[in-house]
Image (spheres, rainbow, N blue to C red):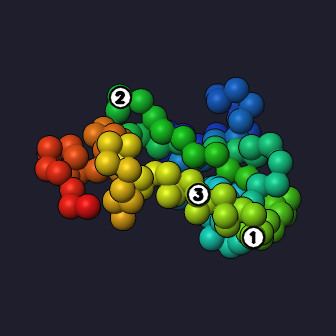
């Protein structure tokens, strides 16, 4: 039986980086998203390995980096200052530069304004 295309746990073919195919990485190696689901973060550690898979959207392969579970640290809690900064950033993303109104949704980047302003419809005061 032949090995999958991206099977290289020693990193010989991929520049010293241990490489695994999709869904075949060891249980002690997790992506950032998998760490976050467990309430953890990489905590400054280097990438331990990678997952490679063939992309249908592009001509090449896609990659996801893996981190060691035993070196992960807990996610830092949100402080009141961080909550305020996040609220201010989200408010700025919802405020239309044309009519200065809070649209109630994140403005589409390709329009740069709220939908009524993009359609040329004046907003009621």
Q: Secondary structure at mark 1?
A: helix
Distance from label 3 to label 1 (Cα)?
12 Å
Q: Is residue 82 visible?
A: yes
**In percent of the image, x 62 and y 64: which residue is there?**
34
Disc 1 or disc 2, which is closer to the eye? 1
Q: Residues within 10 Å of mark 1 (few under 14, many from 20)?
A: few
Residue located beneath label 2 in the image: 59
Task: Place residue 98 in its image quadrant.
Answer: top left
**In percent of the image, x 21 and y 56: which residue is there?**
123
**In percent of the image, x 76 and y 46: which residue is there?**
48
Distance from label 2 to label 3 (Cα)?
40 Å
The location of residue 57, given as percent across then percent down, is 31, 38
Q: Is residue 50 left or right of residue 71?
A: left
Q: Is residue 42 above or below residue 50?
A: below
Q: Is residue 27 visible?
A: no
Q: Secondary structure at mark 2?
A: loop
Task: Place residue 88 in its image quadrant.
Answer: bottom right
Q: Is residue 98 above or below residue 36?
A: above
Q: Name the image quarter holding the C terminus.
A: bottom left
Query: Which callout, 1 or 2, points at the residue further toward the start of the chain?
Result: 2
The location of residue 26, given as percent across then percent down, is 68, 59
Task: Place residue 18 in its image quadrant.
Answer: top right
Residue located beneath label 3 in the image: 88
Q: Secondary structure at mark 3?
A: helix
Query: Which callout, 3 or 1, points at the residue further toward the start of the chain?
Result: 1
Q: Is residue 93 left or right of residue 26?
A: left
Residue located beneath label 1 in the image: 80
Q: Is residue 71 left or right of residue 63?
A: right
- Which disc, if any, is residue 118? none
Distance from label 1 to label 2 (Cα)?
45 Å
């Amino acid at each position: 039986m032949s090995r999958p295309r991206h099977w290289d746990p020693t990193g010989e073919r991929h520049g010293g980086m241990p490489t695994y195919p999709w869904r075949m990485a060891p249980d002690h190696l997790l992506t950032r998203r998998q760490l976050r689901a467990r309430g953890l973060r990489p905590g400054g550690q280097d990438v331990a390995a990678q997952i490679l898979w063939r992309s249908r959207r592009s001509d090449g392969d896609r990659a996801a980096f893996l981190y060691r579970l035993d070196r992960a640290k807990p996610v830092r809690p949100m402080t009141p200052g961080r909550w305020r900064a996040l609220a201010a950033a989200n408010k700025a993303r919802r405020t239309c530069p044309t009519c200065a109104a809070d649209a109630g949704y994140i403005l589409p980047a390709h329009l740069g304004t709220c939908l009524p302003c993009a359609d040329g419809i004046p907003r009621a005061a």
